[in-house]
Amino acid sequence: MQAELEDQFQEFVRARWSHLVRTAYLLTGDPHHAEDLTQTALAKAYRSWRRVSRTDHPEAYVRRMLVSCNSDRFRKRRVTESLTAAPPERAGHDDAVSRADERGTLLAALAGLPPRQRAVVVLRYWEDLSEGEVAEVLGCSPGTVKSQASKGLAKLRTVPGLAQAMSHAAPVQGGSR
């Protein structure tokens, strides 16, 4: 039986690794922290895989672990990150560089949000989860999700360059599922 659970866990990791790392990257803003965070959450999931695998949505369960582990990172010690206002100068400016600049602006803006607002914005608008699903992942009420999303989006709208960068992108279709 243990071998079967091990195989199920390995298959889950193979299938969902990149998606979980992407979510962790949006939560942390750093690819190295994202991989560490994903590994930490998966290590916790592995220890209780028998219980996790019996849930209706194991990925949602692991995603909640990911958000909790990220919150723990801030509780245990203050993370000192040094963000710069502008990237270093570049030789040329083509479309790929422009898209990278827009992405950098968005990631820097997300990094400026408090951890709870950042988690709500990432899960609600990037992962396209409903308010109820976000509330379940974060262990809070849908009203808290709404207020945190509102505050987070309001703060993002004040970031110089973000509104301009986003006006070039396709509009995000909001909607409840």
Image (tube, rainbow, N blue to C red):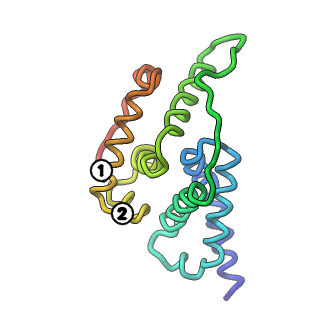
Q: Nearer the viewer, residue 11 or 151?
A: 151
Residue bearing mark 1 = 146
Q: Is residue 57 left or right of residue 36?
A: left
| Residue at disc 1, secondary structure | helix
Disc on the earlier residue, 1 or 2: 2
Q: Is residue 88 above or below residue 103?
A: above
- Amino acid identity at mark 1: Lys
Q: Is residue 21 left or right of residue 132?
A: right
Q: Rounded to the nearest whole Å, what is the CA distance between mark 1 and mark 2?
A: 11 Å
Residue bearing mark 2 = 140
Q: Measuring 39% from the left and 53% from the top, which residue is drawn there?
A: 129
The crowd level at tag 1 (other Cα within 10 Å; few <14, some 14-19, many 20+) is some
Image position, residue 101 (x, y; %): 58, 23
Q: Measuring 67% from the left and 61% from the top, which residue is drawn there?
A: 14
- Amino acid identity at mark 2: Cys
Image position, residue 7 (x, y; %): 69, 75
Image position, residue 135 (x, y; %): 36, 60
Q: Is residue 21 left or right of residue 176?
A: right
Q: Is residue 158 above or below residue 72?
A: above
> Outermost residue toward the top?
92
Q: Nearer the viewer, residue 118 or 174?
A: 118
Does the rendering let one see residue 165? no
Does the rendering let one see residue 136? yes
